[in-house]
Amino acid sequence: MTPQLQVVDTLLAGSAKAASRATDYFLRTQDQQGYWWADLTADTTLESDYILLQLWLHPPVNGVWDPPARPLIDKAVRSILKRQLPDGGFNVYPQGPADISATIKAYFSLKLAGVDYDDPRLAKARNLILSLGGIQAANSYVKVNLSLFDLYPREDCPSIPPEIMLFGKFIYQMSSWTRAIVIPLSIVHSMNPRRPVPEGFNLKELFLAGGHPEFPFSRESFTWRNVFLHLDKGLKLWERRGPKSIRKRAIHKAEQWMLERTRYSDGVAAIYPPMMYVIMALDLLGYAADHPQRVEAQKQFDGLMVDEGDQFFFQPCFSVVWDAAIAAFALGEAPEPPRAALQKCADWLLTKEVRRKGDWSIKRPHTEPSGWYFEFANEHYPDIDDTAMVLLALNRSRASRPSEQKACEERAIQWLLDMQSKDGGWAAFDVDNNWRPLSFVPFADHNAMLDPTCPDITGRVLEALCAYGLDQSHPAVRKGVQYLVRTQEQDGSWYGRWGVDYVYGTFLALRGLAAAGVGDREAYVQRALEWVRAIQNFDGGWGESCESYKRETYVQAPSTPSQTAWAVLALLAGGDTTSTSVHDGMDYLVRTQNADGTWDEELATGTGFPQVFYLCYHLYRNSFPLMALNNFLKIKSGSRGQN
């Protein structure tokens, strides 16, 4: 046996053992109902907003704030302070720089909760805020939240008018998550509550003298930004002098929209920001604390809290369907998959298929409902990415009722086909949600006003469709392939909207192209492979920073298990099964695995809103390495003697 074959055999043996250990971990941790699920964590802004909500719900009495949730507030304070950076700031992703908005939110909540003004930790945060432009440099949502307590001038906040509800289908030009946030918030903002704060409490020390002007106009004669800034000025005049009857009608319509979306869901859109604003909106609309709607809204919000001794944090939502589908597919990629566990998961996934029309149906009114959402319950918002991932998982599983599974798969495939956008790609929740002028609305600085198509979701959808027999003879697949070819970056990579970042996009684009039958000798495939190999770290793994989104190009970071797995899967999809890069990547995964079959990962590899909000999926570090190991073993088992 040649030395090279010896190395390969050693690597195959190590990979098989690592895959077996990881499989054992998943079999040990499968829920009795059949799913897999791990924590989803973000930054300190969630805990900061929790403290703000407590001030809203339990205002000061005679100037003194003594909230009933004081023990939980104290835990939130400790959780926030634990993540303070040496420079006094707070970041939005692990090992990232201080973020002005996150730091202002943390400062407000810490000071409100009783951290002394002269405390060195608060002083450092204050100095950092001033060095970054002061409170005026915060994003719009921070300013709006503070204005509810008269801590920031309302006239310097963007208007969020409920009258948008009166303009037909205009709200559906916004991304699903934006409308879910904005509609309840428009109720809150329009009622101008000016809630009290403890006596003597203010944030005057954060205002920078001569700070940058609020919403400066562009010097160009016509820009969409200028249009919306002029409109914002008009809206402020409307708020003061417009007919109250119209505003009342708009608020009522927003209320009805909001209440409808609390049905068949764990809160509006089942994500943190709308769930918080719904509580505030119901309060202002006169729903008593013991009203069933208020009780349910509070219960769903509190359910996002994780309180385990020294650990206290809020999850932005529950990632259970997503986690379960990825884990099931990873297990199903094994040469000999654990069929009983997969059947149990498939049975559970079938119970989560959407069978009601949601917001997506505004643009696809004649499409039969199907698809899957991300959380335990979110019937109004099935998403395309989850649907594709669940289909891939089901393709590797056999439910206990095969006829039901087949019918479900057929509905979901048709739903995916109908949800293809005009440009040939697929987005997250909607079709053709790409009206660019909306990105210049003053409150659009969360950087996610739209839900345009993206290469990562398009690649996964192509893989799912082709797993069920479609190929480039089908126009949807053909258009999807053309979309990926057209959106490839100059360096050979693809942008990843929902995972960090170019490694993620390239992994999914290459898998989609391979599934669609694109040959690995195509120049664009080879360019992608060269790019993946070129960015490999010296330790054999791959890592990419969230900073990539800001710089709009790949930014190196320490190796992570999930990103290493993505890179290996990208190379394998592109036909590279024998290079040193592949072998070193596999060796990294084998070498860094823990004895219990898991891996460690500290960095954020998931994306919420690029440059604004990032996610740590705590199952990614285990499910994607298993997927890579199984894929490698499957390929090698069919090519022994060809190494």
Image (cartoon, helix red, strand yellow):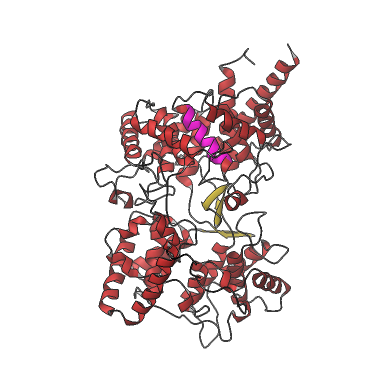
Q: Residue at x 40, y 58 (%)?
A: 437
What x and y, as percent, mark residue 217? 48, 69
Whether residue 26 can be seen here:
yes
Left or right: residue 142 compared with residue 241: right
155 relative to 252 in the view: left or right: right
> Residue, x 62% and y 35% (percent of image)?
531
Of residue 447 and residue 141, the one placed in the foreground of this image is: 447
Q: Quadrant of residue 189?
A: bottom left
Residue at the (65%, 40%) spot, across then down? 599
On-image quarter of the N terminus: top right
Answer left or right for 4 relative to 191: right
Find residue 74 and report its horizontal and vertical position in percent: 61, 70
Dominant SS type (magenta): helix
Q: Is 249 a magenta residue?
A: no
The extreme left residue here reads 366
Q: Looking at the image, is 631 positioned above or below residue 553?
A: above
x, y (%) of residue 616? 58, 50
- Please determine whether, in this image, residue 238 is positioned above or below residue 84: below
Residue sitting farthest toward the bottom: 62
Q: Which residues are magenta?
A: 503-514
Q: Position of residue 483 (x, y in %)?
A: 43, 37
Residue 29: quarter of image: top right
Outermost residue toward the right in this view: 3
User: Where the C terminus falls, by quadrant?
Assistant: top right
Does residue 267 appear in the picture of this structure? no
Q: Total of numbered circles in the picture? A: 0
